Amino acid sequence: METFQNVLMKIGIIAGENKYLSSIKNAFQTFMPFIIIGAVGVLWSNVICNDQTGLGAIVPGIMNLSFLNPAFNALNFATIGCITISITFLIGAELGAKENDNIMFIGLLAVVALLTVTQSSMDIFKDGKLVESVSGIFSTSLGSQGLFTGMVVGIITVELFFVLFKFDRLKIKLPEQVPPQIAKSFEYLIPAFITILIISLIGLAINIWTGAYLNDLIFNIVQQPLLHIGGSLPGVLTLMFISLVFWAIGLHGDNMIGGVFNPILTTLGVQNLEAVQAGLEPTNIVNNTFHRAFFATGGTGCMLGLTIAMLLICKRPENQSIAKLALVPELFNIGEVSMFGVPIVLNPTLVIPFIIAPLVTVIFGYVLTMLHICPIIYVDLPWTMPPLIITFLGSGGNIMGPVCQLLGIILSALVYLPFVKIYEKQQAQLASE
């Protein structure tokens, strides 16, 4: 057990110290409030003030506020619709911070490089003749479809820049009398120019050789397969199992896999929002809010189910006290009281249901959604949103969302019950020795 624990600790340290994974994770965490803001825009225009699919069909008076819809649609476009630009900037800034450099400049550099490989014009033909040439960046490149391209281009751009910046010959040196900020800008000039030019030439070469843009290749070769794997039941169970094993030895499992898992969950959720915004049905069962609803109810490992089980059958006063103390934080999905207070960490008896319970509830929620009993959750909400409320709002106000989550909570409590009983017997035996 100790050898296994040491191996996991080393893996966890490597994952935690990987600057690319941590930069991606931090970028998505920073952008999360804007995803929620965009989701509010979708809720307003499609669930509240809409006379076809929303509350406006039931309460016609609400449509008097429909003049506000363009503003809420703009919220959605500026946040979720342009997520690729923001995430690319944030990844660049995070990598710049790790090099103790100007994070604003490095973030902008990543965005500018991305735009050089982004389609900005399209010729429209009719009957084989050119009718019109349209200029502009298409929304597909700015939204979820360009997300992985932004991540890849952002990382490569920043790394290439820092390699070039190490060469003093490429820096324009100004006299000491020049203000430091201006002098630094000129030092950046040539390395930045070469970096952007190289990225642009790579994009041009790919377009000439394949007839497609870089974003199309990355979307088809990298993003789609990753989303397919991460959004499938076996894929999401595998990633969740890894997270739970890390938690079991005291490492923050969500952070360990966040650099890989967060982009997948966020992209799947954004695709759902984009579908609803376009008047279509969301299709991705797995996303951030689904993860919180069926995997992390009360905290990672379905801590709320553990606390309910303890309140039902525990007789020892210390266990009752911990359960009562843990209940309120767990209503906001903060499970550390149980995680380290019961404890779950390094506790062979309770680690078993800690791993089994959330995997069972995820399978349960996934199957119910496939059977169209549980609605597909498509609104991204804060992770501290209380259970039942999160699924009600996340499903656009469908009452079956919280009903299914409640059944999942009960199921997780049933998984924990026999192990909690065994654990309390073990405590009694130790106390009597």
Image (spheres, rainbow, N blue to C red):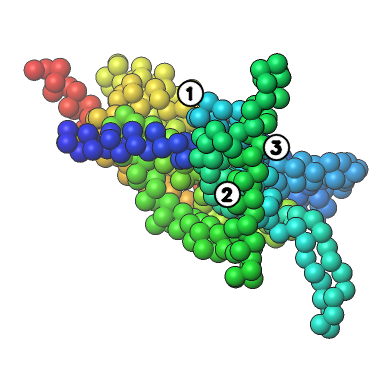
Proximity of marks 3 and 1: CB atoms separated by less than 8 Å: no
- Mark 1 Cα within 10 Å, few/some/many (few <14, many 20+)? some
Q: Which of these two is toward me, 359 or 199?
A: 199
Residue ID for mark 3: 37
**Residue 426 found in image quarter:** top left
State which mark lies toward you, 1 or 2: 2
Which amino acid lies under the numbered mark 2 shown in the image of this protein?
Val
For residue 153, above or below residue 418: below
Which disc is residue 329 wearing?
A: 1
Query: Of label 1 and label 2, which has the lower sequence position?
Result: 2
Q: Residue at x 81, y 71 (%)?
A: 124
Proximity of marks 2 and 3: CB atoms separated by less than 8 Å: no
Q: Which of these two is toward me, 100 or 316?
A: 100
Where the N terminus falls, by quadrant?
top left
Q: CA distance from mark 3 to mark 1?
A: 25 Å
State which mark lies toward you, 3 or 1: 3
Q: Residue at x 36, y 17 (%)?
A: 321
State the SS at label 1: helix
Q: Residue at x 34, y 37 (%)?
A: 14
Residue ID for mark 2: 153
**31 displayed left or right of 361:** right
State which mark lies toward you, 2 or 3: 2
Which amino acid lies under the numbered mark 1 shown in the image of this protein?
Pro
Q: Residue 256 location in percent, x, y?
A: 39, 37
**Residue 304 found in image quarter:** top left
Q: Residue 405 location in percent, x, y?
A: 51, 43
**212 displayed left or right of 233:** right
The reply to whether residue 40 is in sight is yes
- Mark 2 Cα within 10 Å, few/some/many (few <14, many 20+)? many
Query: Of label 3 and label 1, which has the lower sequence position?
Result: 3
Residue furthest left as drawn: 433
- Mark 3 Cα within 10 Å, few/some/many (few <14, many 20+)? some
